[in-house]
Amino acid sequence: MRIPTPCGPVSRAVHDHLESGTPLLELPDTPDPTSRDHALALWTLHELAYRGFDGVDPDLEWSPDVLRLRNRLSRDLEAWLRRRFAEATVPGTVEDLVSADTQTPGVARFVRERASVEDVERILVQRSVYHLKEADPQCFLLPRLRPAAKAALTELQYDELGDGEPDLVHQHLFAQALEAAGLDPTYGAYVDDADEETLTLNNAISLLCLNRRLIHAALGHLAAFEATSALPSADMVRGLQRLGFAEPVWRYYDEHVEADAVHEHLARRICDLATEGDPALEREVLFGAFVCVDLEDRCAERLVPAAVPA
Amino acid sequence: MSSDRTGPSPREALRELAAQGPALVRGVGFVVDADGETTQARRPVVALCRCEASARRPWCDGTHKRLA
């Protein structure tokens, strides 16, 4: 993919550094993790650890300038996430957090009940930023886990990545969904169209998965993500069928009904194996689960227009 | 006659099963149900529905969470 189009001074500096080696010395004056400019800059810097950009020197992934800015933006984002966690009324367990969240209508119910074709296209565009790299961030967690948790996470990841069948890799199923909906299935095609909320959600996942220190939060995020997927995926299938979308568009979600009914339990077990009952680590798991639910809700607020009273 | 009942009511039993969630089983090739119908397993670990409310039996589809 090409380097995303800048939308402010920080993402401009990142763009120019990657494109032409302009020094990346200036750090932003104040933290502003929810500006699209900062979110896009961090997304771009994270992407150097995944697939990188056309024509960009792969060595820049580890350049001191890149790491300095990435650390700064990451710290700002983590501080913002932890502040939201501290200020929110959060149930004591991941299960209660997730079940409280499933009471609130989100994107899936909107699609099931009243979204238009254009609404769905808008949603698929935003979702594509993550779904086209789905399960990639969590691959970074594997070497950091001990055998029991490692074996359990591998079991989950193997299923995410197609059980040995390239056609069943979940990110590939989503690419086919985009194509069948008349959208661009290319990796990263819609980053320029991504809302700040979408970029921040993606940045949070990379933040948790790329930093070994945050591994328990990363696992909590995964547990919440999987636990809030099966039933909403069934809603997505019904909505997409209601609107007459072709089979490949809803097949991605159809696959997730059964898959995530399994993954939910695997992910919860992985958390237990990784924390071994340590309350501080369990708190980190809960923090990660909160990040998942909180940022998904932010995206839903952006994507779901308020219902017009009948 | 309800006072003679020793076990849970059907509703209570369903709640209990729903609260347990599905049975996760590794290495299932196929499942044969009571009517002799065979369903192939497509993944290395499957979640078998225990509450009988799933729309995708024998597989779990998460519906138990709405019953528990």
Image: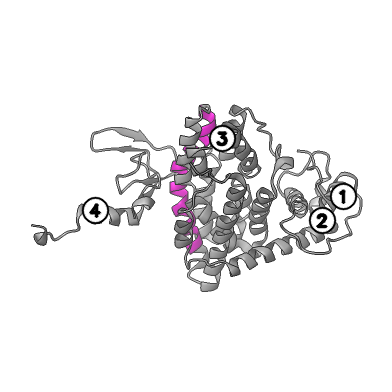
User: What secondary structure predominates along the stretch shown in magenta?
Assistant: helix
Q: Earlier in the sequence, mark 3 or mark 1?
A: 1
The answer to whether residue A172 is left or right of residue A232 is right
Residue at 57 percent of width and 56 percent of height? A292
Q: Mark 2 points at which residue?
A: A66
Q: Which of marks 2 and 1 is nearer the N terminus?
A: 1
Residue at 54 percent of width and 64 percent of height? A285
Residue at 85 percent of width and 58 percent of height? A65
Contact (Cβ within 8 Å) of mark 2 with mark 1: yes
Q: Name the residue under label 4.
A: B11
- Disc 2 marks a residue whose amino acid type is Val
Closer mark to the observer between disc 4 and disc 1: 4
Q: Earlier in the sequence, mark 2 or mark 3?
A: 2
Label 4 Cα neighbours within 10 Å, binned few <14 / some 14-19 / many ≥20: few
Q: Are marks 4 and 1 on the same chain?
A: no
Q: Give the range drawn in magenta.
A: A247-272
Residue at 51 percent of width and 42 percent of height? A110
Q: Name the residue under label 3.
A: A173
Q: What chain letter is assigned to the residue under label 1?
A: A
Q: Do labels 2 and 1 share a chain?
A: yes
Closer mark to the observer between disc 4 and disc 2: 4
Q: Are marks 4 and 2 on the same chain?
A: no
- SS state under label 2: helix
Q: Quadrant of the N terminus of chain B?
A: bottom left
Closer mark to the observer between disc 4 and disc 3: 4
